[in-house]
Structure formats: C-alpha cells, structure tokens
Amino acid sequence: MQLIVSEKNCGVSTSDSQIVIARSNATKQTHTKANADKLRMLVVDKWTQQGIRHGFGGADLDIATSVNRWAEVFGQNNKPLLFKQIHSDVFVVINNLTGVENLLQNRPEGDAWIIDCVALKKHGGVFVGIKTADCIPVLIVHKDYFAAVHCGWRGAAIGVLVKVIEYLKGRGVDAKDIEVAIGPGAQVHNYEIGEDVAEEFASSYISFKKNNVGCSEGGIAEDEIVVKRAGKLYGNIPRLLMHQLAHCNVPFSNVVVSTTCTIEDKNYFSCRRQGDSAGRQITYIGI
C-alpha cells in the first residue's frame, strides 16, 4: 500500500492525492473566500474513506481559545482528551469510558495517546488530541488501535514514537499492518538547531539504527537528520521519525509525510515565527 501526500491550498504544490484538505465534515473542497469561516483539516484520504475520524488542524482553530468551535470538529457534546504536554516519552492508553471521564476532568502529563479500538468498539465520541506549533504531530492507524503522538525535538530524540509502536507490537500488532501519517511542522530548511540538539539527534540516530531497512535504499542516512549549511546546523525531525519507523520495521510504503513547514506557512501556528503569542493547532483521531 502506498500513501501519497497532497496539501492543496496549504502552500505546497504537488500532484498527489492521498492527503487532502477537507472541511470539518470530511468532504473534499477547495478553500475559497466564500467558505473562509469553515475549518480546514488536513486528512489522509484513505482513512477518511474508511470512516476514521481524524485531522491535522491549522491556525483557523486555536485549540486553547476556540472551544466554541470544537463541535464543528468533534460533534456536539464531545471533547478531545488533551495532555499537559511535557516533551516526554510518556503515553496513555484509553481502553474504558471511566478512564475517559477521569482524563477529561484531570489532564495528565504526557505526549502520546493510544486508543484501544477493540475495547471501545461499542462506544463513539472518544477523541484524543495533541497540540503543536512547530513540533511534529504523528497519527497512527491499525485495525485495533489508533494513536496520536507529539514529537518535539526532545520527544523525537528519546523515541516517544518508537515507544508507542513497541507497545502496539507487544499487544500482538504486526508492524507491517501499521499506517502512519507525519503532519505539518518545522521542516529542515528552516529549523536551525544548536550543537546540543544536534548531538541529541546523532545519539538518537545511533540508538535506533538497528534494522533500519524500511526502504529500498537501505534506510535513512545520518547526514539527513542533521544538515550542515553555511556554517549552521539544521534538524530534520521528520527524517529522524522515519529512521525510527524503519527501526520498528514499519514499511515506508505505509507512511505519508507532510512537507508543509509551519515556520513559513501562515496557515499554521509557529513558535519560531510568532514567539510566545503563537496559538496551538490540534491533531486528533477518534472513534
């Protein structure tokens, strides 16, 4: 199976069609002035066709301040589970409604959600979300589990994505049946980093080098993770995440990667561009 990226009206011009801009009702439409009040969501077309409710949001919905618009995304009376994000490898598994109610009342600390779809198959309206403004949002789909992962540079370096996938594999999931979408975030051409972060990325690369055979070329090269240009260092978190997916034996043919850079695209919030005033877009998935 091949997943291909297309980000229409998001500052990226491609001819692909598997990730599309959709309205909050998951229909594929062109963003026009007449519909400027409608929420835009980047979605994986295949998942939408399968009825999987998900999306990568943008700056037209600040998840912290636009609570009045949540119903457009999640439906009436539904709220997303959100973390006090701490740039960690901590994940929370949702497998019963009692736990959902508790977590809605008391947001936990952490950076990755896992939904046990089998345990919750009789229940709807359970959504999990992560907040970003340059960090990389990741969604994972398997027939029995969904996951949403917040991958800032710290979380990516310590392997929060790997930890989530290894948990799924420990529950009997075959890595070849896992599908992954890596959403908009800081891209390498704009994401300047210091030597300390570069060292963390290099260490992470070595830690997750085992079994890095996810593509025909033999994997991701180390010089793709930290790029040196004009005396400066730039970090490539999406490529580091791809390297880790290969380590986990997730086929690259099951992975789609956004090329939208939130630092330069004003359709998205960006801490690098906006500083402390930046809002937070949401990436969500649910049943």
Image (spheres, rainbow, N blue to C red):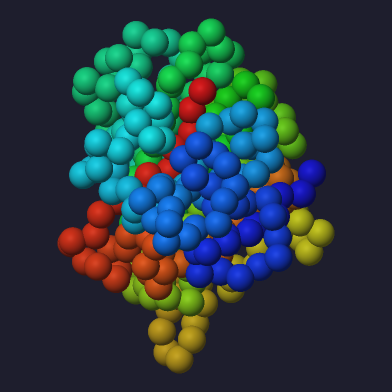
Given the current orientation, which residue lies at the most extreme left position?
276
Question: From what the image shows, is residue 113 above or below residue 244?
Answer: above
Which of the 4 image quarters holds residue 249? top right
Q: Position of residue 112 (x, y in %)?
A: 42, 36
Which of the 4 image quarters holds residue 48? top right
Residue that appears at 35% across and 13% down:
99
Residue that appears at 41% across and 69% down:
265
Residue 236 visible to an observer of this rendering: no
Question: From what the image shows, is residue 28 above or below residue 70?
Answer: below
Question: From what the image shows, is residue 117 above or below residue 140?
Answer: above
The one nearer the camera, 117 or 110, is 117
The number of discs equals 0
Given the current orientation, which residue lies at the most extreme bottom position?
230
The one nearer the camera, 106 or 170, is 106
Q: Is residue 146 left or right of residue 95?
A: right
Q: Is residue 46 left or right of residue 269?
A: right
Q: Position of residue 67 (x, y in %)?
A: 25, 37
Q: Is residue 131 left or right of residue 174?
A: left
Which of the 4 image quarters holds residue 34? bottom left
Residue that appears at 50% across and 37% down:
25
Residue 193 visible to an observer of this rendering: yes
Q: Position of residue 167 (x, y in %)?
A: 55, 28
Residue that appears at 35% across and 31% down:
71
Q: Position of residue 104 (x, y in %)?
A: 27, 22
Q: Which quadrant does the N terminus fall into? A: top right
